[in-house]
Amino acid sequence: MIIVANWKMNPKTLKEAEKLFVSIGRGIKIRRKKRKKLPEIVICPPSVYLFNLKKELSSLRSLTPFLKAGAQDVFWEEEGAYTGEISPLMLKDVGCKYVIIGHSERRRYFGETDEMINKKVKAALKAGLYPILCVGETEKERKKGNIGDILRKQIKSALKGISGSELQTLRFSIAYEPVWAIGSGKACEAGEVRKVKLIIKKVLSSLYSLDVVKKIRLLYGGSVNGSIAGKYIKDGEIDGLLVGGASLRAGEFLKIVDNSFE
Ligand code: PGA
């Protein structure tokens, strides 16, 4: 089980980011004492905060197997004249394990194409990062009834030229994030998520062996909060959650962590 916090472009100051991180860390520490098994928790702050939060994490050392740092995006080159970009090697160097790739906000506001996402996935895997690939349909696409086609295209393009063995050695996750459910308060129903999971599995099975498909974790993201989180794990039969807005409130996020046991 994996719970990923996508802080997006929040909070506004490093001080607030550290406070939030420590509150979540302390909450996890308390839960760790009570339960042997915890989900893996990945916090993806804005990149400028990564290094400091990583330092905070070392002071919470007993938590490192559970609490990890991740990035919200990555560039595909290792170094060079690419103003504003951050390379997979740089993320690795500051202690990042996971990286979100192809989030719908990046596709929508920054013109990320399936080809760019494919390059990013390849570069992340090469650097030994664990990619969390985001896929999902818009409201318009859903109304047209072609969710399967959209997901098939997004997944096939993102994984083009990537072998099963490359995926198998690293933890690879796919997050189903319907665009209409992100930040809207209109979460996709758990039963619906279960159906989409089958579509995704089918697409993956057309590309890779059963062994590889079984290892790919499937997450859901889109307006998840503390009161509905457990439903996805139980009825949606998924391996984890990608949480935006609710991950900015330590109490709410910890409630999601608690519900992920049910
Ligand atoms: P949300 O965002 O939880 O605020 O809907 C999820 C995401 O964008 O990953």
Image (cartoon, helix red, strand yellow):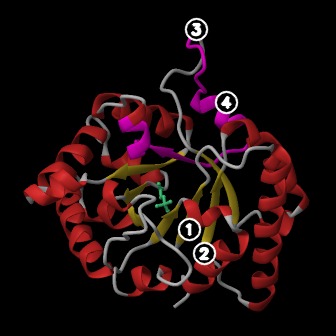
Residue at left offset 49%, top offset 51% = 170
- The residue to which callout 4 is attached is 90
Residue at left offset 40%, top offset 49% = 133
Tell me which amino acid carries mark 1: Ile
Decide: is 122 above or below 141: above
Decide: is 249 above or below 260: above
Tell me which amino acid carries mark 4: Met
Q: Is residue 94 magenta?
A: yes
Question: Callout 2: 10 Å neighbours few (<14), some, many (20+)?
Answer: some
Question: Do we see residue 23 in this rendering?
Answer: yes
Question: Callout 1: 10 Å neighbours few (<14), some, many (20+)?
Answer: many
Which one is earlier in the sequence, the residue at label 3 or at label 2? 2
Judged from this view, the residue extending furthest toward the top is 81
Residue at left offset 80%, top offset 49% = 53
**What segment carries the magenta color?**
82-108
Cα–Cα gap, marks 4 and 1: 24 Å
SS of the residue under disc 1? strand
Tell me which amino acid carries mark 2: Pro
Contact between labelled residues 2 and 4, with CB atoms less than 8 Å apart: no
Q: Position of residue 20 (x, y in %)?
A: 78, 61
Cα–Cα gap, marks 3 and 4: 14 Å
- The residue to which callout 1 is attached is 3
Cα–Cα gap, marks 2 and 1: 7 Å
SS of the residue under disc 3? loop
Q: Position of residue 13 (x, y in %)?
A: 79, 44
Cα–Cα gap, marks 3 and 1: 35 Å
Residue 39: mark in rendering:
2
Contact between labelled residues 1 and 2, with CB atoms less than 8 Å apart: yes
Contact between labelled residues 1 and 4, with CB atoms less than 8 Å apart: no
Give the number of callouts.
4
Which one is earlier in the sequence, the residue at label 3 or at label 4? 3
- The residue to which callout 3 is attached is 81
